Amino acid sequence: MLNFIKNWTLPIAMLAGVVGYLLFVNVPLLEPTKPFVNSLIAFLTPTLIFAQLLLTFCKVNVRDLLPVRWHGWLLLFQICSCLLMVAVLLLSKLDVAYREVFEGAMVCLICPTATAAAVITGKLGGSVSALTTYTLLSNILAAVAVPLLFPLVEPHADLSFFTAFLKILSKVFPLLLCPFFAAWLIRLYLPKLHQWLLNLHDLAFYLWAVALTIVTAQTFKSLVESDTPASVKMLIALAGLFACAVQFLLGKKIGAHYHDRISAGQALGQKNTVLAIWMAYTYLDPVSSLAPGSYVLWQNIINSYQLWKKRKKEGK
């Protein structure tokens, strides 16, 4: 049983999230616990991300955080693909439903790398330092591009560029930089604690699985409770699937050329969907947020498959 849980952690976490949501909706006895659970989730999610990044960044040497060539190609793809979606939305007269589909795809393409992508990258045997550098770069790109480009698509957005820039940075950088600097200080001044944290080999991965359970439950809730027609939901979810598959495949292809296939694939494919959902709600038609919502499921299905392949290869 323990081996089964270890081998299928991510699918089990996603299933647990769906089952947990269904229980809370359909079991009346759990109704009084909802306020407590909501408060617990609001506390647990950033705490789990901080802890898993601290453990992951303990393995990273600051001197290794240098830009490499594949970073430039991935950033170029992100901005060009976003510009293409903007051009389609501005130049074509699409029905509202189809605009929501393209807006959803646009959010998924420009969205920066997930802060927790380093955990899966390390588990798959990729370069955590290269991934961490790209995470910083992609967040800066999104913080500049989104306030400039998204209001062109939905001009009613009332945030100025500078305000939006600071809001995006405030949502990402504390959670990314605080564990990074904490790990750096522990490495310098608390070597025994640093060594002890290094010995907790898979803990960061299992903390990510718990966080994934929570995120899956929230994603499933938004998909089920949205009053958008089912046909539009399906198209938007398919846009998320298309964006996910293209970015994982292209990232791996570019990374393979520079002998860093795993890191580049995760860098371009694994997205900060919580930030993407916020960007969609803030700048675009809120229905488009279903695309990054579905992206949570697609990227973790791909991650589960990659981990299964790695285990199978190691078994041989």
Image: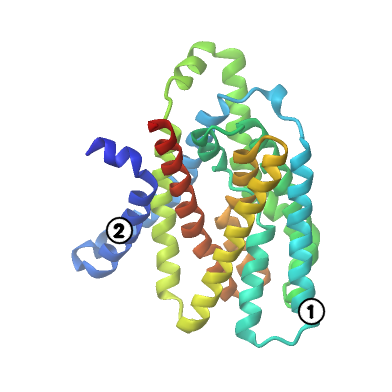
The x, y position of residue 37, in whole percent, is 34, 55
Q: Can you identify the residue that label 1 sits on?
A: 90
Mark 1 or mark 2, whichever is nearer to me? 1
The x, y position of residue 45, in whole percent, is 46, 47
Q: Is 84 placed above or below 247 here? A: below
Q: Secondary structure at mark 1?
A: helix
Judged left or right of residue 132, residue 204 is left
Marks 1 and 2, the one that precedes in the sequence: 2
Q: Amino acid at mark 2?
A: Gly
User: Residues under labels 1 and 2: Cα distance?
Assistant: 41 Å
Residue 160, visible in the rendered structure? no
The x, y position of residue 105, in whole percent, is 64, 68
Residue 176, visible in the rendered structure? yes
Q: Is 119 placed above or below 43 here? A: above
Quadrant, the C terminus: top left
Q: Amino acid at mark 1?
A: Leu
Is disc 1 in contact with disc 2, using a CB cutoff of under 8 Å? no
Q: Extreme left residue here?
A: 29
Residue shown at 40% from the left, 73% from the top: 224
* Image quadrant assignment for residue 157: bottom right
For this rendering, which residue is in front, 309 or 182? Answer: 309
For this rendering, which residue is in front, 173 or 85? Answer: 85
* Image quadrant assignment for residue 203: top left
Q: Can you identify the residue that label 2 sits on?
A: 20
The x, y position of residue 253, in whole percent, is 67, 47
Q: Extreme front residue here?
A: 316
Quadrant, the N terminus: top left
For this rendering, which residue is in front, 44 or 230? Answer: 230
